[in-house]
Image (cartoon, rainbow, N blue to C red):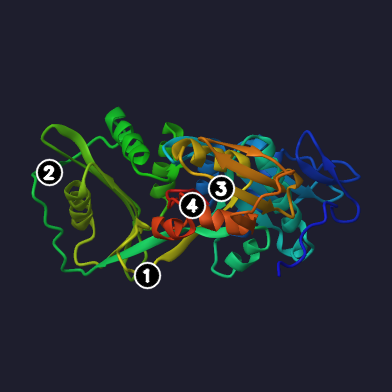
Amino acid sequence: MQPPLWDGRFPAGYVLCPHQRTLVVTGCYYNMSKKDNIRRLWIECFGDSPEYADMYFSRVYHDEDVMTVTNDDGRIESSLQMVRFDMTMAGQRVPLSYLCGASTARRSRGKGYMTSLVCQAIEISRERGSMMCALIPAHDWLYSYFDRFGFSTVYLADRQCFTSFHPFPVVEKYHPVDDLYAPEVFDSFERYELARPGGVIHSHRDFLNIMDDLSFRKGGKFVAVGREGVPVAGMAWAVDRDRFVQVNELLGIDEDARTAALRALRESFPDRQFTVLAPATDGTGRHLYPRGMGRLVNPLMCLGVLAAANPAWKSAVRVSDPLIDDNNHIFIVGGGSCRIDDGYRGSLDFDVTIEVLTRIVFSSRATGEMLRFPSERTHISLMLH
């Protein structure tokens, strides 16, 4: 049974400021900009250096993406960011809200502020057109915390481990890409992300932010390699985790090119064990590890995208969502589209919560075939905080 969630009312004494998406107490604002106030809270909660905070708040942060709780002096006690992305699903690009920067001042924890902000973020994400919310819990215990809001662990990683002696053999002849900021590097990055089914898509600005973020990480390294006829054939991002080198993303035109990117990383990390966080794929038989969570905020959009890609698919789905009233409907899929029909009296193929529907949508293809549902794996990587 799902534990009780936010009832739509904010903590006593707090009201919603609709234009700033800010919970405020009656009183004046502290004499500090919203950005500087959140920057102060960010450093307190995450322990990032002032230099990293300067980079993040000058290049990544936007006031309009942030919700906050403030005290009667205007001092921000809790904040949460909703960053806009696109994701691929069933061959289409659909809007996604990425929740990050969840932070509460130490003295104000345990008062329900973050619970209110997460509930609000879910609702606002739908209002601004997102199909889904995504997040990456900073600690394992947070997975159970976000379960309460209807999030499901749909982002999984296939951890592929390579010993310090692995040579990463390749067939083709490769050369390093010297200018990692050249236009063709991002063009290839974007093309490889779009070619992979199911995943978050990064803009050119995101790409530059990822490069900046990597420069602050211990052992942060990005490599790209080319071969004859393909100026940028493979690329990889890695950080040093002390006991091993973790490859957070690996992209390329084919398997040989991706292996060549690992071989190029080996030059920077000789005699080190590699762990590659590869996208979850079906049929490997390997254990998959949690990498992030997702929650559908617009099931009509989701089922419509799947219906358009699978015109022969027919289904009747009743969804219950304790946080978003507009999601509590019966959805009828058929003829390549999806519609709401709460007067439907036929048999239901699925009668599920929003959490269960999210799990089904992003399950393995084998699970989908058993359920007669066009399930598709999804992927997340290279996200900041």
As drawn, the label of residue 287 is 1
Measured as percent of width and height from the top left, residue 208 is found at 41, 37
| Mark 4 vs mark 3, CA separation in Å | 8 Å
| Nearest to the observer: residue 222 or residue 149 | 149
The nearer-to-camera label among 1 and 4 is 4
Residue 328 relative to residue 26: left or right: left
**Residue displayed at 42% across by 32% down:** 204
**Quick check: 192 above or below 155?**
above
**Residue displayed at 19% across by 33% down:** 231
Give the position of the N terminus as an image quadrant: bottom right
Could you say whether the residue bearing mark 1 is in a helix, strand or loop?
Answer: loop
Does residue 60 appear in the picture of this structure? no
| Mark 1 vs mark 4, CA separation in Å | 23 Å
Residue that label 3 marks: 315
Which amino acid type is marked by label 2?
A: Tyr
Could you say whether the residue bearing mark 3 is in a helix, strand or loop?
Answer: strand
User: Which mark sits nearer the N-terminus, 1 or 4?
Assistant: 1
| Mark 1 vs mark 3, CA separation in Å | 31 Å
Residue that label 4 marks: 373
Measured as percent of width and height from the top left, residue 80 is found at 66, 49
**Residue displayed at 37% across by 70% down:** 287
As drawn, the label of residue 174 is 2
The nearer-to-camera label among 2 and 1 is 1
The nearer-to-camera label among 3 and 2 is 3
Measured as percent of width and height from the top left, residue 104 is found at 70, 58
Residue 332 relative to residue 123: left or right: left
| Mark 2 vs mark 1, CA separation in Å | 32 Å
| Nearest to the observer: residue 93 or residue 277 | 93
Which amino acid type is marked by label 1?
A: His
**Quick check: 108 above or below 220?**
below
Pointer 4 and pointer 3: residues touching (CB < 8 Å)? yes
